[in-house]
Image (spheres, grey):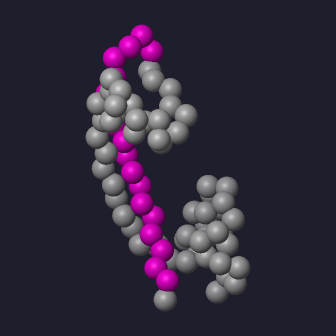
Amino acid sequence: MKRFWKTTILVTVLSEGDSPPEFGSLGQVAREIDYGDMSGAWNDEHEEVTRDTMSNLLEEQGSDPAFLLGEDDE
């Protein structure tokens, strides 16, 4: 039986400047923390979810549930 997980990652970035930083991707955030002039820390939280919940979460993100659940929705 497949298990489904929802992982929430909270990234806190500390920076200096006249305006808040703008990021176009998670990769850019990571580069700024690892190699740039910003400090960052992150926490993650994992929650096992049901197939129906996963289907709803995927739809909320604009993804086709078949992406993770397959074509046959049991």
Q: Residue at x 47, y 42 (%)?
A: 26
Q: Residue at x 31, y 45 (%)?
A: 42
Which quarter of the rendering shows the C terminus?
bottom right
Left or right of 64 on screen, residue 53: left
x, y percent for residue 62? 67, 56
Left or right of 58 on screen, residue 28: left
> Where is 64 relative to 33, above or below?
below
Residue range of the region highlighted in magenta in the rendering: 2-19
Toward the bottom, the furthest residue is 1
Total numbered circles: 0
Toward the top, the furthest residue is 18
Q: Quadrant of residue 68?
A: bottom right
Q: Quadrant of residue 61?
A: bottom right
Q: Residue at x 45, y 15 (%)?
A: 19
x, y percent for residue 11? 36, 42
Observer-nearest of 37 and 54: 37
- Give the prevailing secondary structure in the magenta stretch: strand
* Residue 13 visible at all: no
Left or right of 43 on screen, residue 8: right
Q: Residue at x 49, y 89 (%)?
A: 1
* Residue 17 visible at all: yes
Q: Is 9 colored magenta in this rendering?
A: yes
